[in-house]
Every structure is written in structure tokens, then in C-alpha cells.
Amino acid sequence: MTPAMKCFDTQLKDYRLDHDSFKFHHKLLGHPAMDMKHLCDVIPKLAADGNVYYSSGKLSTNANLDRAYLDHKNGLSIEETVHRMKDVDSYIFVRGPETQPAFKDLFAALCSDVDVWLKLNGFGCRTIDPLMFIFVASPNSVTPFHIDRISTLLMQFQGNKTVTVFPAWDHRTVQPEVLENYMIRSGDRPVYDPSFENLGHPFEFGPGEAIHIPFVAPHHVKNGADEVSISLSITFHSTRSEKLKEAMFLNRLMRKRLKMRPTPVGENARLDLRKAGTYSTYTRVRDSFKKKA
């Protein structure tokens, strides 16, 4: 018997993790930790710990999201920004709010549900490297085209938005070499081109709804015009995504050091597993030599 989920629609068990993007429902609407008044109080505290990044919300779809807080500053303090989200055209990104007491139980409940889902999909028994994120954005804000290096469950609490998700491993949107470089944080990043917009699936997204964004699936977001948007995500790795990540690391080694053209990850599941095993062996041998040196 499938354990009852605390945070997500029980029908989540019917969906395939990391194969498709899809919309479902969450049970957390009205949670006090996600109320705007509470966020106005807690976000400046999190900012003091270096866990808050914010920028102008007037970004292009092809802007560099990783550098938005540096390249597109809104000229305000975080206190001013969070209290004036309705009229300052800003975007706030909070990393790891579970360090605050108000979010600890919520984080634990989300991880428990993800554990259940991983087991149902045969991807291990425990969530790997889970992390929570909060997004607060002014009306009409844009989250540029980007890829997450993990799997994502995104939940909406206030406002509406359109989340456009593109298939993972689709070479028409992101070339394998770009994805491999991005995964090791080389500075390379996927670049948006309007010509492949019709390859994505736009999800109209409102309060009480959630979206699964598969591992390395590109996506971008446009907020509605009428209300400040509040979203929460839980991100994580599974045993499967960890193996795929290691396979990409090996591919990059093969390209850079051996000048080979390996089969892109995501095309052959058995080959990807063998590559992951090879990379794991390589890192153990490399680290062993480092210790002896």
C-alpha cells in the first residue's frame, strides 16, 4: 500500500519522475510560513546569512539568471524590495530557507513525500541533497530560460504564471557539449532562441498547483500581470539523476582529454550506467593518487 503523502496530491504516484513534465496539486495552500507578511519578516533575516539574491524583474528570456543579481540590480535594499514587490518590478530568490524554524517541519514533510515518490519509481529510498527555494516576483516578471542541475517540484502559493518546460536531452534546444559544460559549472550556459519556443510545453500555473520539472529540462517563466507571485520548490537528486550526472562528467573528460565524440547522455540508458560506473572508478583512483602525493 502506498503511504499517504503529506504535501502532494496522492495521484503523484501515477506519474513518472524525471521523464515528463506535468502539473498536479499540492496540499500546502494557506501554510503560515508562505504568507507574504511572514516572508516580509523572514527574508531579510535569511539575507543576512547570504541566502537571498534579488534583481530587477524586467529580464529578457535570454538573460543570464545566475548573474541577474549582479547585472540587473534594482537599486533597493532587500527590506525595501520585499515590502514593495507590487510596484518595484523585482525578483527575489531565497536559497535554503529551511534554516529558519518556520520552515523546518515543512521541509521535512516535503522530503518525506519525495522519498515515497523515489521508491515508487525505483530511484532509491532516500532523497539525495534536497534543498528548498522560495521565489517572490513582481507582476510581469520574467525568469529567464535556464536549466536546473537537479530535479524540481515547484509549488504556487499566490499569483499566476506561465511556466514553459522543454524536454530534457533535446539537442534542438541544448547541445550535449553545452549541457556537460554547464553541469561542471564551466561558465558555459544554455542560450535561448525564439525559434524553438514551440518545442516547449506552457503550463498555466496558479495557487494550489505544482509542476514537476525533470532533471536538466530547460524552462522559463512569465508571471501574471495582476499579483505578486509566491512560489516554493523542493529540489533533489535521485540515484538515477546522480548516475546521469556522472555519465555527463565522463563525457566531458572524453571530449576534452581524449578528443572523442561520445554518445550523448540520455540516448542509451545502459551505456549511461556504464559511463557512471567508469567515472566513479576514475574519481576513486584519482583521489587515491592525490592522497599518496
Image (cartoon, helix red, strand yellow):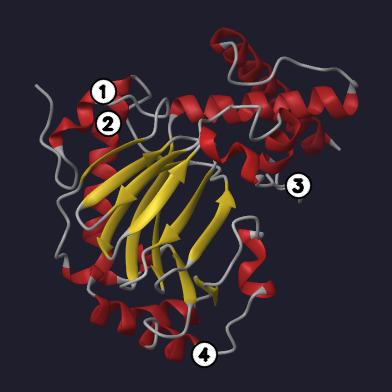
Name which residue type carries label 4: Ser
Q: Residues within 10 Å of mark 2 (few under 14, many from 20)?
A: many
Depth check, mark 1 against mark 3: the one in front is 3
Quarter in which the N terminus is drawn: top left
- The secondary structure type at the circle numbered 4 is loop
Does the residue at mark 2 contact the one at mark 1 (Cβ under 8 Å)? Answer: yes
Q: Position of residue 281 (x, y in %)?
A: 68, 20
Depth check, mark 3 against mark 2: the one in front is 3
Q: Is residue 121 left or right of residue 169?
A: left
Label for residue 117?
A: 2
Q: What residue is disc 4 on?
A: 77
Residue drawn at 42 percent across, 29 percent down: 18
Q: Residues within 10 Å of mark 1 (few under 14, many from 20)?
A: some
Q: What residue is disc 1 on?
A: 120
Mark 2 vs mark 1, CA separation in Å: 5 Å
Location of residue 255 with respect to 26 vertically, above or below: above
